[in-house]
Amino acid sequence: MNDLNALVMSAQTAFADAHTQADLENAKARFLGKTGLVTELMKGLATLSPVEKKVQGAAINLAKQAVELALGQRRQALADDELAYQLKAESLDVSLPGRLRPPGGLHPVSLTLERIEQIFDSMGFEVAQGPEIETDWYNFTALNTPQGHPARSMHDTFYVEGGCLLRTHTSPMQIRHAVSHVKRHQALLDAGQAMPEIRVIAPGRTYRVDSDATHSPMFHQCEGLWIGENISFKDLKVVFTDFCRTFFESADLVLRFRPSFFPFTEPSAEIDIQFPSGPLAGRWLEVAGSGQVHPQVVRNMGLDPERYMGFAFGMGPDRLTMLRYGVNDLRLFFDGDIRFLSQFR
Ligand code: PHE
């Protein structure tokens, strides 16, 4: 009897010590398995006399039931623990404040580019995109700036293998766009008929070896080109004045076309603006280079300069953004500091 009590107690202890279902199954095998302690006792009954068998058998059965009960209880307890643990781990505190995703916004220079595109779109200009890695031909030679031309020295840039370079301005798009336009309308030209005008802007990234508060090795430009049979410097003045006044929402903005030199325009002018009021009032601020497209460039576009002419300009959207928002360091645009950028949302 005492042995059986001890057996039941040791089973209870073993079950209590099992902290996983697997441990518990191992403990169960030690008592109730095929060669388990309880099972061995049952086997031992075979050698006893019928009377002893009856008494011992009943006692062993009681012990077995007690072991099974302890096992069942421990199983339930482990299952309860597991459920409680799982509920706790996967609990959801619906009273916590939500995690907000702050609204994003466009980069200030992107805002400017969108604005430029909108304004020129309203004046009937297409928008064209071109490659940032250019050939020497499009970036320089076709723009009347052959090898050895002194104007090249102001456009020091990054060269890549194969003689290509990171474009120093968006002016190569003058040639690229005009050539494809001419190709599209070659039949008209061959028949001596008038070709639809070229009216395009080409915004994008440009590169020069330059770096200070107002120059960055990567910066933006937006080219403009209008070629037709009778497009003159007067049209440049009207279009660009209209653009600047709309862009800065200032009908009194004053423009100055200051004589300058570019190999691909003749005559050429630097365009300065002056605000009538505000912190920048009274100062001339340079915003673009411009001019009548040089006859040699018109020829490189595949057109007859005796018949076709027009103007081009190249402006700096970074500069326009600085002026519009009163930003004094160009580098802020390219640092990616969220505290700066979020002010333009
Ligand atoms: N590409 C010139 C520059 O980067 C600007 C320009 C464009 C001048 C078109 C005239 C005509 O300085």
Image (cartoon, rainbow, N blue to C red):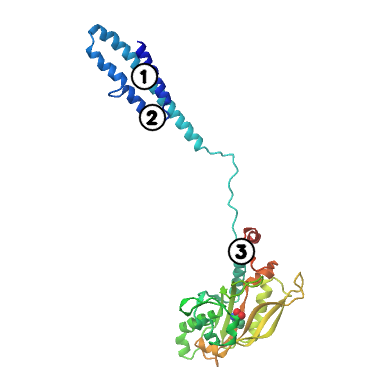
Image x and y of residue 339, in percent: 65, 58
> Gap between marks 2 and 3, in whole Å?
59 Å
> Gap between marks 3 and 1, in whole Å?
73 Å
Label 2, secondary structure: give it.
Answer: helix
Kind of residue indicated by mark 3: Asp
Of the numbered discs in the image, which one, if any, rests on residue 67?
Answer: 1
Label 1, secondary structure: give it.
Answer: helix
Of residues 1 and 169, which is closer to you in this image? 1
**Is 13 situated left or right of 32 in this image?**
right
Image x and y of residue 214, in percent: 66, 72
Q: Quadrant of ligand 1?
A: bottom right
Image x and y of residue 233, in percent: 64, 86
Q: Which numbered disc flags the more N-terminal residue, 2 or 3?
A: 2
Q: Residues within 10 Å of mark 3 (few under 14, many from 20)?
A: few
Residue 313, can we see it? no
Q: Quadrant of residue 69?
A: top left
Of the numbered discs in the image, which one, if any, rests on residue 23?
Answer: 2
Kind of residue indicated by mark 2: Asp
- According to the image, label 3 marks what residue? 335
Q: Which numbered disc flags the more N-terminal residue, 3 or 1?
A: 1
| Quadrant for the N terminus in the image | top left
Kind of residue indicated by mark 1: Val
> Gap between marks 2 and 1, in whole Å?
16 Å
Decide: is 60 above or below 204: above
